[in-house]
Image: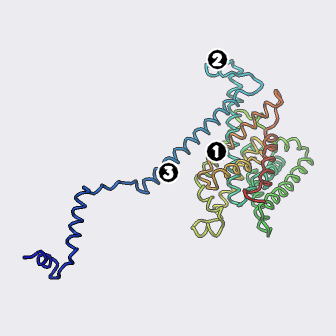
Amino acid sequence: MSAVHRDTSLRGGRPAAPGAVATAGNRIRTAAADGPAPRAVALPSADAAGADLVARTTRRRRLAVAAALLGVALLAGVSLFVGVSQLSVGDVLSGRLTEAQAQTLLASRVPRTVAILLAGSAMAIAGLVMQLLVRNKFVEPSTAGTTESAGLGLITVTLLAPGLPLAGKMGMAAVFALAGTVLFLRVLRAIPLRSAVVVPLVGMMLSGIVGAASTFIAYRFYMLHTLSSWMTGDFSGVVRGRYELLWVVAACTVVAYLAANRFTVAGLGEEFTTNLGLNYRRVLALGLSIVAVTSAVVVVVVGGLPFLGLVVPNVVSLAMGDYLRRSLPWVAILGAAFVLVCDIVGRLVIYPAEIPIGVVVGVVGAAVFLFLLLRRPAGAR
């Protein structure tokens, strides 16, 4: 049988083109000359690369948080040894303290430092929660009438029930603080134009009105000094047995962290929150309650810390965005560190005397507040 016939039989009876057999043979020879086909290289999948990136990012964040906590711990250690009564690190570590030194350390310095950490972190978080709920970066308890309303509550309960325990006064201050915050929100709803600058100005005017009412009542009943001591932040009077109420704000901080996702969603507006199946009014009530209780406790125990809840959340927001669950630990850490630094500065500037922490925080916070108001975004003319 001829070659053409064999090829015809293989192709179903149709003769192949003359060059087809030669071409096929050339392909076979070329493949044999080139050797075996190269093996496929296994590339990492997109899922594996994404998981590795997430793991590295998580490790970096944890290391950054650990470094920040270490810095706060070092500041807290410095705070323990700043003051008129001389304490040395060596004596504390070795246990060679006199009775007076041990009393100073355990009854004054340690409670003061713990109070600074709790108050600083809690007020910074309260400011962040209020900014999310009001949807304005320039709002915090001292610029929305919350702190002044707490002071009005203290004056009222002192006049009506002077023998009420400190916890009862704190509860009355919290009720007034919540009422003042709700009044602020009602006023905002009645204003057609709600620009970024108008909202804090409305809050500051409301704060001025409530503060003027408190001052008038205090003047009529000879309580101006008492009101001034309440509204000016000062940690010099914080001792063992007086700061324990601040653990309430620690509980408020935990609640704020657990409800962080709800507050983030509520910050996007009532319609968006309702579409996701959340009760906007309940979330708003929870957030305002946290803000009111935190402000009232801090005012009762320490006094007012103006602009703290405004400065710290804005600094963290510029670096990390507005996702509350991720930024809340940093707000707490930076708030505690900020108050620690201001307190140490206030104790050293006119040593051995002391500048109240409210004055130092107010000066620094007001300067940063003006900077944030006047700051132009990148590329703006």
Q: Residue at x 55, y 41 (%)?
A: 63
Residue at the location (20% across, 76% down)? 18
Query: Mark 2 and mark 3 in contact (Cβ < 8 Å)?
Result: no
Residue type at mark 3? Val
Quadrant of the rendered structure where residue 289 is? bottom right
Q: Position of residue 109 (x, y in %)?
A: 70, 30
Against 139, is 359 above or below? above
Which badge, 3 or 2, comes first in the chain's sequence?
Answer: 3
Q: Residues within 10 Å of mark 1 (few under 14, many from 20)?
A: some
Contact between marks 3 and 1 (CB within 8 A): the answer is no
The residue labelled by disc 2 is 96
Q: Nearer the viewer, residue 258 or 271?
A: 271
Q: Which numbered disc flags the more N-terminal residue, 1 or 2? A: 2
Residue, disc 3? 54
Of the numbered discs in the image, which one, if any, rests on residue 250? 1
The x, y position of residue 153, in whole percent, is 80, 51
In the shown orientation, is residue 29 left or right of residue 86? left
Q: Is residue 130 above or below residue 227?
A: below
Mark 2 lies on a secondary structure that is loop
Q: Earlier in the sequence, mark 3 or mark 1?
A: 3
Amino acid under disc 2 = Arg
